[in-house]
Image (cartoon, rainbow, N blue to C red):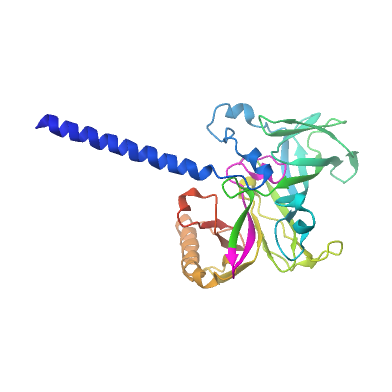
Amino acid sequence: MLSAYKSRDRCSLLLLIVVIIAFCGSGQSSLLHPYEYEHQKLASKPDSFLPGSVGELERRIPRYVEPLDYFIRIRPYFPEKITNAVAHNSSLNMTFDGISTFVFRANEPRMNVTLHSSRLNYTSVKVMHGDGSVMDANANFTFNITLEHIIIHLKQELVTDETYMIQFVYKGGIHDYLETGLYYSPVWIEGEKIFLLATHMEPARARWVFPCLDEPAYKAVFHITLIYPKGLVALANAMERPPVPVKSFPNWDVIQFPPSLRMSTYLVAFAIGDYENQETYTEDGTLIRIWGWRGQKKYLEWAKTITPKCLYQLGQYTNFKYPGDKSGELVLHRSFNLLLQLSKLLTTII
């Protein structure tokens, strides 16, 4: 009898192992999707840079400089009928133009500045003093691909406690939702396939969107500017201002968002798409907005009811009021969040 129980236990254990292996295999197969765009092949390598991985300390950037501000301007290109930019130039498809200015204070004399950067192609790099006077209009730069670093080589040594600026002009890619950074989410609305754009910078994907000190300890203020097809909605960490037409680009609007709170790079967020929302307020006056794509508004009611209560009670429990003037959730059809993979929904603060 005892041997029969042991035999049955062994069979149960073997069955459990088979189920686990099958589950893991099915999970991996979902990641082995065909690449829709050529630049996505570059995004398939493992995240060897993540905290706790081998060689983490060697990859950290010492505090040679202190970040103060990032001024980031993004203009994405994706299939849409408003500007038809991609239809006129297919090579632009799922890419973006970026201009980013990094403002920092030198902590010690240096002849170079190192930032994180990955999957970005640079057109020019300009180094300036804090007053805007040019130190080097076309600075030399090199890459450490393994560490995902861009090293800007200076003609003059940095002076301790002085403020400097580095302006980057570059191009980047809009990735699949399993890769993140700036990613696309396709949905069908009234029989038409449209694309929604959003960001997911965690844990270390801000470097895919703009050159930065992409470590949580480095905090700064972010100034986001988005150029996007007229009639769509643009969102970011700070409250959006009214859009302004871009004179040089017909059918494009631009929003220059107010400065963000001082925060880490992985918290930077923005989105562009055919969005609509439900909104309400917490008991202490914080604006809450729940965003979804067009046609989803009626399904956002439950989140609109629950979210302000949760945020308010969290503040009461921690004795710390939410510091922003607004908070929101953006619901997308596809997301990087694998915990919600079955429902294909993403909830992200924006």
Q: Report which quarter residue 110 is drawn in.
A: top right
Whether residue 302 is in magenta: the answer is no
Quadrant in which the C terminus is drawn? bottom right
The percent coordinates of residue 161 (x first, y second) are 78, 37
- Observer-nearest of 196 and 223: 196
Left or right of 109 on screen, residue 314 = left
- Observer-nearest of 227 and 313: 227
The percent coordinates of residue 328 (x first, y second) are 57, 62
The percent coordinates of residue 289 (x first, y second) are 57, 67
Task: Report how many numbered discs are placed on residues in the image.
Answer: 0
The percent coordinates of residue 56 (x first, y second) are 58, 29
Look at the image and give the residue range highlighted in magenta.
Answer: 188-216
Whether residue 197 is in magenta: the answer is yes
Residue drawn at x 24%, y 37% as measured from the top left: 12
Quadrant in which the N terminus is drawn? top left
Looking at the picture, does residue 59 appear above or below residue 179?
A: above
Point out the residue furthest to the bottom here. Answer: 298
Left or right of 70 on screen, residue 315 = left
